[in-house]
Image: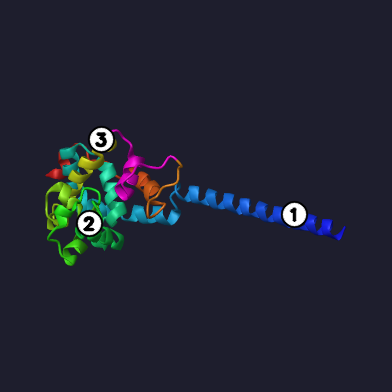
Amino acid sequence: MARKRASRFDTGRLGHFVGAFLVFGALYLAWTYYHAHVVTPWHAAGDRAGKDVAEEHYAVDVLSAARKYDLDYSYLMALLMLECSGKKPAGARFEPHVYKRLQQVRDGKRRSYENVTPAHLADASDDALRNLATSWGPFQLMGYKCILLDVNIRDIRGPNGVGHGADWINQTYGNSLRAGRFKDCFHMHNTGSPYPKTGLPRTHDPQYVPRGLAMMNQFTAPEPPDAILH
């Protein structure tokens, strides 16, 4: 009899534990989903505050690049807000995991990394790899992207950084951008892949995509378009 009571007690405790686990799991999933789709008030306030600075620094170059490559002006402005907060100079960010993979390619331990092959890195020093593994410019392009663009790193981090960044966007996901798939485009810029069907992004910041989409509403190309270019 005592064993039966103990068994019922253990089963009851297990049921409570499983129930609590499911409730907390559901709450966590709901919070994660919410956080990935709704811009928090503090992010929204900061993004609005940076609008004027971003336009002052980049509107002319972005409008020129948008017209040259037939890319959405509002998307490009929102993207550089995400990547460099509209600051000029934009700064740089070293990515250790990219550096390690490029080392593996150079040393023959990895066949390729995206479009980078051992032939591209045959004479690259560790310092050179470090530059290739650093993101530069207003769109924070990784240094190794210069291989696809057939330019030097100093070009993508220099005064024509917007133009080279727009060129890379045009070559890699420009068709998606012209098709209006902005959600996919923000995710592709940050992760290299379209927005997951699960509804949960794989961006470094879960607010990255919703912030980008929200900021697109802040930026409107001037009419007539030549007004800002003169």
Comparing marks 1 and 3, which lies closer to the viewer? Answer: 1
Q: CA distance from mark 2 to mark 1?
A: 55 Å
**Where in the figure is residue 226, as x and y percent of width and height?**
15, 39
Q: CA distance from mark 3 to mark 2?
A: 30 Å
Report the span colored magenta.
178-197
Q: Compare residues 115 and 223 and report the one nearer the observer.
A: 115
**Residue 21 visible (yes or no):** yes
Q: Compare residues 69 and 135 and report the one nearer the observer.
A: 135
The residue singled out by tag 1 in the image is 11
Dividing the picture into quarters, in which one does residue 75 lie?
top left
The residue singled out by tag 2 in the image is 105
Residue 142 part of the magenta segment: no
SS category of the residue bearing label 1: helix
Quadrant occupied by the C terminus: top left
Q: Compare residues 210 and 6 and report the one nearer the observer.
A: 6
The residue singled out by tag 3 in the image is 175
- Residue drawn at x 36%, y 44% is 213
**Where in the figure is residue 13, as x and y percent of width and height?**
73, 57
SS category of the residue bearing label 2: helix
